[in-house]
Structure formats: structure tokens, C-alpha cells
């Protein structure tokens, strides 16, 4: 299936997403805890998909999306946001994210979104 980079400052969220994705045939090739680390890992790993938190230290998700898109315009990124963050989700989509998933995660919604953006 797809190679995926999971980006979130909370270890619990990264672990949860990794478990959901890998138990459904995807391969998590890396995890990052901030936007700067995400850009560095994206360059190195060239994943098929990035799941991107918005609120993180060092560099937020919006800036990281812009950084990744400047490296690879066709990068596929899904934003992970908490309920009530519609404004930043819109900003993330405008920056180049393909879709979003809402925390707390529902496994079926996560997988549906991942498969849809990957056209699988």
C-alpha cells in the first residue's frame, strides 16, 4: 500500500495513527513531532502521503505544508485537526493539503480519507 509520514507533536496521536494505518496495510516510514522535522523527513523519505497536525512547536502544520509543497508540488498531505478548527483547516487546504481528518480519530474515517486522496 502507501508509504506514510505521520506528523504530530503528541506521541500518543502518532502511535494511534501508525497503528490504524499499519493494521490496514499501509507502511509508516517515519514520524515527526514538529513541522521542521516533517520537512526534513519528507526530503529524505519521499512518502506517498503525509498526515499533518496543525498546532505544533518549532514550525506549525501550515508552514510545514508550504515547505513540503515547495519541495514537491504534487505532495499528498492530509491535515489532522481538532473539532472547531475549521478556519485553520481551510487555511491548510489553501496551502495545499488535499483533505482533513478530525481528532479524536475514527478509524473508518481515517482510512476512507487516506484511500480517497491516494485514489485507492
Image (spheres, helix red, strand yellow):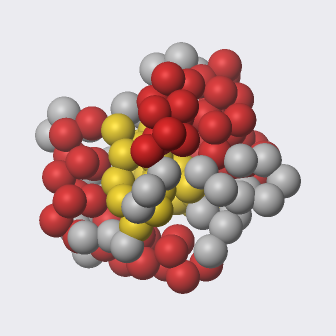
Viewer-nearest residue: 95 or 19: 95
Q: From where the camera sits, is residue 5 visible?
A: no
Q: Quadrant of residue 76?
A: top left
Viewer-nearest residue: 47 or 53: 53
The residue at 38%/32% (across/down) is: 98
- What x and y, as percent, mark residue 87? 50, 39
The residue at 51%/74% (across/down) is: 13
- What x and y, as percent, mark residue 24? 22, 67
Q: Quadrant of residue 83?
A: bottom left
**Quadrant containing the C terminus in the rendered view:** top left
Q: Is residue 107 above or below residue 85?
A: below
The residue at 46%/62% (across/down) is: 82
Viewer-nearest residue: 16 or 57: 57
- What x and y, as percent, mark residue 100? 37, 46
Q: Is residue 109 above or below residue 70?
A: below
Q: Is residue 4 above or below residue 78?
A: below
Q: From where the camera sits, is residue 42 visible?
A: yes
User: Relative to residue 13, is residue 35 drawn left or right?
Assistant: right
Q: Which residue extends farthest right? A: 58
- What x and y, as percent, mark residue 22? 33, 69
Q: What is the total number of numbered labels drawn onto the structure image?
A: 0
Amino acid at each position: 500500500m502507501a508509504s506514510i509520514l505521520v506528523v504530530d507533536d503528541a506521541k500518543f496521536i502518532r502511535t494511534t495513527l501508525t497503528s490504524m494505518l499499519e493494521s490496514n496495510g499501509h507502511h509508516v516510514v517515519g514520524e515527526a513531532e514538529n513541522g521542521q522535522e516533517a520537512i526534513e523527513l519528507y526530503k529524505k523519505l519521499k512518502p506517498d502521503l503525509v498526515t499533518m497536525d496543525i498546532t505544533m512547536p518549532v514550525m506549525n502544520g501550515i508552514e510545514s505544508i508550504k515547505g513540503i509543497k515547495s519541495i514537491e508540488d504534487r505532495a499528498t498531505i492530509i491535515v489532522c485537526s481538532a473539532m472547531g478548527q475549521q478556519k485553520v483547516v481551510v487555511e491548510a487546504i489553501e496551502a495545499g493539503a488535499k483533505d482533513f481528518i478530525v481528532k479524536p480519530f475514527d478509524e473508518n474515517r481515517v482510512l476512507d480519507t487516506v484511500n480517497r486522496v491516494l485514489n485507492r
